[in-house]
Amino acid sequence: MSARLLYVMDPMCSWCWGFAPVAQALIAQAHAAGIETHLVPGGLRSGSTPLDASTRRYILEHWQAVNETTGQPFTLEGAMPEGFVYDTEPACRALVTARGLDPTRTWALLAAIQQAFYQGSVDVTLAPALVDLAEQVGFDRAAFAERFTSTDVRAATAADFTWVQDLGIAGFPTLLAERNGQLALLTNGYQSLDALSPLLGRWLQQAACA
């Protein structure tokens, strides 16, 4: 019997930041039962042009709504300054890079990217910023930087995006439970820990009995 959780998200998705404490608790709950979690960056948004003022204002209003719902902190002043291009591919690719080098540190890098973007107003679309964060959580700087720009990692990131799209996942965060190749949806979108922990608990019991 093979079983695991699949956490499909984007490090620059505000609802995923709001969900971060819930995700951490659920991942720990599964780990305690011997079930590991595989991180799948989903590719929320690719951008090639800077945000205009109205789009920036809309996004910041969205951040405020996430804060009010989840309590997660956001720094609005100075966020996404003029000229910012909202492209989530580099941050997703950083997670794929980490997953290939040291999966155990991937979660620390995810947290570092989210905190840097949402609380520190760091432009995490830029490779130097992502390499800095990777080094801060324990990756070798040169090895990470080399792998981050490699053709293999670019292809692996694109493959993750395609897998998510082919599965029909339209929103993040999404948490899936996989047992013997069969997927069960635990959540698509933000839900509280009180709502999801019992649901995961029942699945873990079934997985243990299978």
Image: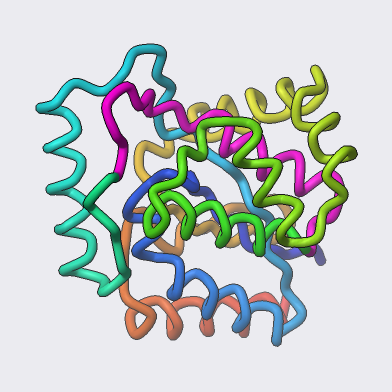
* Residue span colored magenta: 79-104
- Rendered image coloring scheme: rainbow
Q: What residue is shown at x 42% (from left), y 39% (from top)?
A: 169
Q: In the picture shown, does residue 85 fall above or below 69?
A: above
Q: What residue is shown at x 34% (from left), y 63% (from top)?
A: 18
State which quadrant residue 32 falls in.
bottom right
Q: Is residue 95 left or right of residue 24?
A: right
Q: Quadrant of the N terminus?
A: bottom right
Q: Is residue 197 left or right of residue 91?
A: left
**Between 194 and 200, the one nearer to me in the picture:** 194
Q: Position of residue 6 (x, y in %)?
A: 61, 55
Q: Residue furthest top?
A: 48
* Total number of numbered discs in the rendering: 0
**Between 141 and 5, the one nearer to me in the picture:** 141
Q: Is residue 170 left or right of residue 123?
A: left
Q: Position of residue 151 (x, y in %)?
A: 80, 17
Q: What residue is shown at x 66% (from left), y 29% (from top)?
A: 157
Q: Quadrant of the C terminus?
A: bottom right
Q: What residue is shown at x 82% (from left), y 40% (from top)?
A: 144
Q: In the picture shown, does residue 15 fall above or below 206?
A: above
Q: Position of residue 40 (x, y in %)?
A: 61, 45
**Between 142 and 94, the one nearer to me in the picture:** 142
Q: Position of residue 82 (x, y in %)?
A: 27, 26
Q: Is residue 54 left or right of residue 148?
A: left
Q: Indicate whether residue 102 is drawn in magenta.
A: yes
State which quadrant residue 194 falls in.
bottom left
Q: Indicate whether residue 201 is drawn in magenta.
A: no
